[in-house]
Amino acid sequence: TVSFCEEFLDRVYVAGDTAQPDRLYYSSVPSAGAVSWTSGNGNIDIEPENGAGGITALSKVPGYLLIFKARSMHRWNFNSAFPESLVSIGTPSQESVVKGGGLCAFFSASSWKTRGFYITNGDRPLPISHDRARNIKKWIDAIPQSYEANISGTGTETYFAWSIGDVTVDGIAYTNVVVKWNRIFDQWSVRSYPSEFRVFAHYI
């Protein structure tokens, strides 16, 4: 009955239980190649009273498991809990959250002012799409509100990219748009494809 899954420090973490939307469950560490959900396991409720909605995504960076709600982000390192909100910026969906190069990047729609893309190494998220001087902000502002929960991302050591659907910018309609940020050069590019990308995954 859960929707999100992440491995951190040899334990499996899951969330998205509709009956307990604020609850983070974790398994035991592996024994003979298997984890247990009845011995050595546990759970923690992530600020159910903070008004940020239920858990929407899980991710990790070196040293921390990251727990996202629609309007907040939290950290956990198993030895010490950080149940208080790190920041009032969250994400509407698991698909927008991307790991790469020791960083986590994601889309936030927590408010109109904070709406856009962010990166974090476990500290306060830094906005990467709010720079009007480079004209990327107008592409972010053009994302339909109805598409926010469908934004999906992918990333590597050098770039992060997100599928943002159909948008209209400067009076011109574009379909199946992907915005790509090169973290080495701090540069954005915009592309349009014949098909829509809904989910990205790495294959090894």
Image (tube, helix red, strand yellow):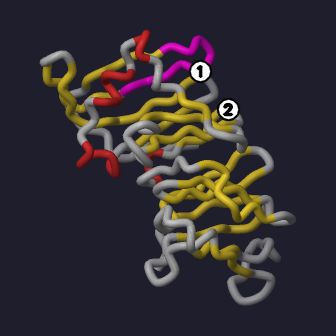
Q: Residues within 10 Å of mark 1 (few under 14, many from 20)?
A: some
Which is more toward the observer, 135 or 12? 135
Question: Residue at image x 26%, y 23%?
Answer: 192
Q: Amino acid at mark 2?
A: Gly
Q: Position of residue 15 (x, y in %)?
A: 55, 70
185 is within the stretch colored magenta: yes
Which is more toward the observer, 48 or 76? 48
Q: Start and end of the magenta stretch?
A: 179-187
Picture disc at residue 183: 1
Q: Position of residue 94 (x, y in %)?
A: 47, 54
Q: Position of residue 110 (x, y in %)?
A: 44, 48
Q: Mark 2 falls on what kind of element?
A: loop
Question: Residue at image x 38%, y 47%?
Answer: 199
178 is within the stretch colored magenta: no
Q: Which residue in the structure is indicated by mark 2?
A: 101
- The answer to whether 44 is drawn above or below residue 13 in the figure is below
